[in-house]
Amino acid sequence: MNFEKEKHHFKGDETGLDKEKYVIETFLFESQIDPEDAALHLCQEHSTAQWKRVDVDEDFRPQHAAKLLSLEVLETKDTPAFPAPFHTGPKFHTCRARIANPHINFGAKLPNLLTVVCGEGVFYSPGITAIKLLDLDFPDAYLDQFEGPQFGVRGVRDLLQIYDRPIFLGVVKPNIGLDPGSFSELAYQSWLGGLDAPKDDEMLADVGYSTLEKRTALLGKLRRKAEQETGEKKMYIANITDEVDRIEALHDMAVANGINAVMLNGWAIGLSACRSLRKKAKVPLVAHFDFIAAFTRVPYFGMSVALSTKLQRLAGFDIILFPGLSARMQTTKEEMMSNVKACLEPMGKIKPSLPVPGGSDWAGNLDKMYDIMGSVDFGMVPGRGVFNHPMGPKAGARSFRQAWEAIQKKIPVKEYANSHEELKTAFEAFEEC
Amino acid sequence: MNFEKEKHHFKGDETGLDKEKYVIETFLFESQIDPEDAALHLCQEHSTAQWKRVDVDEDFRPQHAAKLLSLEVLETKDTPAFPAPFHTGPKFHTCRARIANPHINFGAKLPNLLTVVCGEGVFYSPGITAIKLLDLDFPDAYLDQFEGPQFGVRGVRDLLQIYDRPIFLGVVKPNIGLDPGSFSELAYQSWLGGLDAPKDDEMLADVGYSTLEKRTALLGKLRRKAEQETGEKKMYIANITDEVDRIEALHDMAVANGINAVMLNGWAIGLSACRSLRKKAKVPLVAHFDFIAAFTRVPYFGMSVALSTKLQRLAGFDIILFPGLSARMQTTKEEMMSNVKACLEPMGKIKPSLPVPGGSDWAGNLDKMYDIMGSVDFGMVPGRGVFNHPMGPKAGARSFRQAWEAIQKKIPVKEYANSHEELKTAFEAFEEC
């Protein structure tokens, strides 16, 4: 095959494109061959790798080929992004490419979409030594085939009857090992103190020492009790992460037990199973971010974390957790805000998801997070910051509500702590962390 | 929390360990703090992040904590594996750690296993700047809870009645765009020429221009016809990759139409959905390797490709495709053989899966591959090498059988080509590729 003679078939024209027919991919890639050749090979490899039968006069490329819309060479270096036996250079070009891929090839199906935009053709393309899928832009004709979040930010707020502040989630700790009775009591205390929606740790699901059936039965009752005692709406987020053939039954059982939100470790289960549950779910779906770092954190390989969030929104998650700003999370403000944008930006008819930056939250972080967000449409999800509060989880939860009171009153949170014991104790315990 | 006083709780002892209770993780990680501190923090973060309630005298670590068994510092450098704002050093230690993680924490469930071994706790652990999960060793008590492959290598051989040579799969091309009738005719020709098991391209599933229903109906009939005409058993591998709530129905429909193997792009769908289908499947399951590169190809981040293969075997795939040796695949012999080992090595009661290195195979590769494998227990999966053969797919398939004849007769394949037209044409067309 003489690629030189064929490559014009993979060139596209942004202005002439029927945009409703294409998903637009943005790739960052590194090439050790001519960048345009690499980009056009890439188009071929993840669409019409072979476009005709032998001895038949036909060409499937006009309708089915991916087409290069634009290409920028950002940098040329002498060393590859990472060393490997086949990365021989001598020059390595860092490039950004926009490619239009016809969705007739894969349909509005997450596994088939992933196969094309993050499959063999993308990662094994001639001359490309590193590649990261930065973004996908979907036309309305494509988005309209997805359900998206059932509740979205507004629906979650309606359930909780909270419209003017961030949502206070929480991760019940000790995360592993506690019996269902003691565990539920901790969640109950956190509700009394002011949490809206405590949840299971991502590592705690339906396990022998704490079955989801026992745990949700207790938590469902205590949730209603907490609502009566506080006069506030309360939520519990049960982690129903399990083998795919069990999650629907676990959802149904949890809901029957009075649980009003369920968590799925989305990418660890597979987003398609989450979308499948979404079609039948009766309560909001909450996504935890396990496994995502494995394919998002390296700057030049895999998929951008914001796209992993966008795909979770597309799969139908109402609440999406992602790395927040503590030292442990090693996450920049820019990365965090790219996830917030993926949750909230307009996306056809797909509802926004509530963004929840997570990791080592405590009451003293709230003002900073609110400043950065510039809106109340986010959640906080403290773990040890509530459940390892020296005065216990009720006080830990209260410290968050006190921090919010301070923000509303425009009093510095640390100053407010002087007259509020729970908040003061939080500063003493967590400020150095 | 004074970690100095707590860290001995995360130290383990290989000889004293009740091995049946633990999954053993092998991590490669880079640390910018004391390596042992980093490894012990890692143990904490992906098990008992908080191990007791406030004001209660209890400790869940003896039963539930992950425990460091061994630690090797391989190298200390001045620069991190990849630059990031939080990778400040000044020194970076490359380490290998073996950690025992009690499976009581997560159970024999793939999403929960992944959540623990490749979740938040692993990728966001204090002082660790890069981390790759190299391997998992499962005790029999854990493996016994998985079904594994239903057919395995022996079962696939029994279906095809082939015991003394590699299995010749193939990817029908043009991969995208062809109508079901023309497509099926190509598969039929490849059977007549000598392929055992042509298959759909990973990007071709149930799409509007070629529904799986129409395609499998035609292919099922032609498969039987090819069996009658050749006197050989034949297989077609239909790609039923789709949203999870459709794959069982697609499997059933394909089987009813006479299809006798189905392909799932395993990691793109999610391995748990594949395991769920495995429990009901009537035909062998074939795994394609989409999405895997995103989290396996960087040497110091994510998961080893061999482990991604091992997990596919655990999920129940009978035939597993992974990158082979052509220039396009940028894969070393060592990497390829690590996948072969993951398919074939003893694994409790879990049957072996047939390993299939893929990517730009043609007849002239066969002897090299057979040499490297040292056994007939593998598959070849040519695409263009059969379906873009200048004399057509029947001749392309025949070129593979001719190459195998040459190997059996201990005649160099290229010499054998002189007297075998299809093989000779293959050399003319593909030797330079």
Image (spheres, coloured by chain):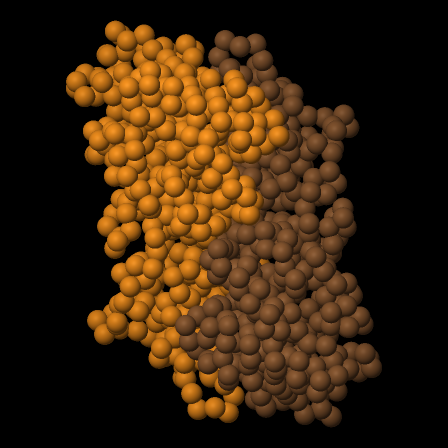
Chain colours: A brown, B orange
Identified at 31% across, 38% down, the residue is B354
Q: Position of residue A224 (x, y in %)?
A: 66, 80
Q: Is residue B156 above or below residue B192?
A: below
Q: Is residue A35 above or below residue B311?
A: above
User: In front: B423, or B42?
Assistant: B423
Identified at 54% across, 27% down, the residue is B214
Q: Is residue B171 above or below residue A318?
A: above
Question: Farthest residue toward the left?
Answer: B410
Identified at 73% across, 50% down, the residue is A350
Identified at 64% across, 34% down, the residue is A103
**Residue A302 in view:** no
Q: Is residue B251 above or below residue B179?
A: below
Q: Position of residue A179 (x, y in %)?
A: 46, 81
User: In front: B82, or B432?
Assistant: B432
Q: Specify whether A96 is left or right of B427.
A: right
**Residue A168 in view:** yes
Q: Position of residue B147 (x, y in %)?
A: 34, 53
User: In front: B222, or B112?
Assistant: B222
Total numbered badges shown on the rendered structure: 0
Residue B321 location, quadrant: top left
The quadrant in which the C terminus of chain B is found is top left
Residue A222 location, quadrant: bottom right
Q: Specify whether A200 is left or right of B282.
A: right
Question: Farthest residue toward the front?
Answer: B256
Q: Position of residue A113 (x, y in %)?
A: 58, 40
